[in-house]
Amino acid sequence: MQLWYYEDYEDGVKLGLAAKEVLFRDKSDFQTVDVIETEAYGRMLLLDGLVMTTDKDEFVYHELISHVPALNHKKPERVVVIGGGDGGTVRELLKHPEIKEIVLCEIDGMVVEVCEKYFPEIAKGIRDPRVKLNIGDGIAYMAEHEANSLDLVVVDSTDPIGPGEGLFSGAFYNSVAKALKSDGLMVCQSEGLWHPPAVLQRIHKNVSAGFAHVYPYIASIPTYPKGTWSWTMASKNAIDVKKFDKARLKKIEATNLKYLNEDLMTGVFALPNFFKAKLKF
Ligand code: AG3
């Protein structure tokens, strides 16, 4: 009998993936952690029943959350990743030779262990000498961080429910803004294009409370709710996203980017009208 896995979006829509087997299933101190071998998308990681990443489409999310802000910063040297325990974001950030140190602050040690075992291609950067793994609470880490000291903060979180909720609050974005230098950038995953307006507006409003300039961008991710996802880059000083560093992109493209190229570095910031209206943007 065929085994199916469903993520229930609770509005009369579900995503169904045919599964070959359950490779791992446990409950950490924070959430349930599942690894499922699917027919169509390879291995899939779920936290509290929500799809976090799959072998086949992870590259879209991880290239976008890391290279878009890194190439819009003149010289990113000191970086913090909050969440991101699968390691995909760190793997992409490590492609930037300018980056000297990445602190990976993941609350759930089980996520790191499981991903190193079942997703070696995604997790391979975690033990790089430039990465400092910190198993702990990202909210406390940012609140206590030295002010004015970081170039880039990447918030690679789950949804704004459960352990990830506080990572979408105005207080958190304020502490990120304080820890960043004046030309520093933050980026966060900011949920799907088809999410209810209230969810998207709250994220947008809270990011805007910490940062004067916000730049949402989007891409298609087939295994995330309703198939199109958004991220939001934010800064204290205005950024011209057309002026990203093309020479550095060329070098990074040579490391085999599967999604991003010169056109898309600005193209991802083109937003449909209904989405802008939802954000009140
Ligand atoms: N971050 C999670 C995106 C949220 C997906 N939401 C959902 N399936 N309901 C992904 C982490 C990858 N490093």
Image (tube, rainbow, N blue to C red):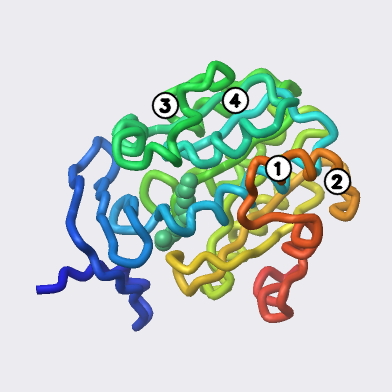
- Ligand 1 positioned in quadrant: bottom left
Q: Tell me how far mark 4 sits from mark 1, CA to CA.
A: 22 Å
| Secondary structure at numbered mark 3 | loop
Q: Quick one: label 4, few (<14), some, or many (20+) residues within 10 Å?
A: many
Task: Pick whichever of labels 3 and 1 is earlier in the sequence.
Answer: 3
Q: Quadrant of residue 249?
A: top right
Residue name at image x 71 percent, y 77 percent: 272
Q: Which residue is mark 4?
A: 102
- Residue with the mark numbered 2: 246
Which of disc 2 and disc 1 is earlier in sequence? Answer: 2
Distance from Cα at disc 3 to Cα at disc 1:
34 Å
The quarter of the displayed image where residue 194 is located: bottom right
Above-or-below relation of 109 to 270 = above
On the rendered image, what quadrant is the N terminus found in? bottom left
Per the image, the residue denoted by label 3 is 136
Instruction: Kindly state the secondary structure of the residue where label 1 is placed.
Output: loop
| Callout in the foreground (4, 1) | 1
Q: Alpha-carbon neighbours of circle 2 within 10 Å: few (<14), some, or many (≥20)?
A: some
Q: Is residue 35 visible?
A: yes
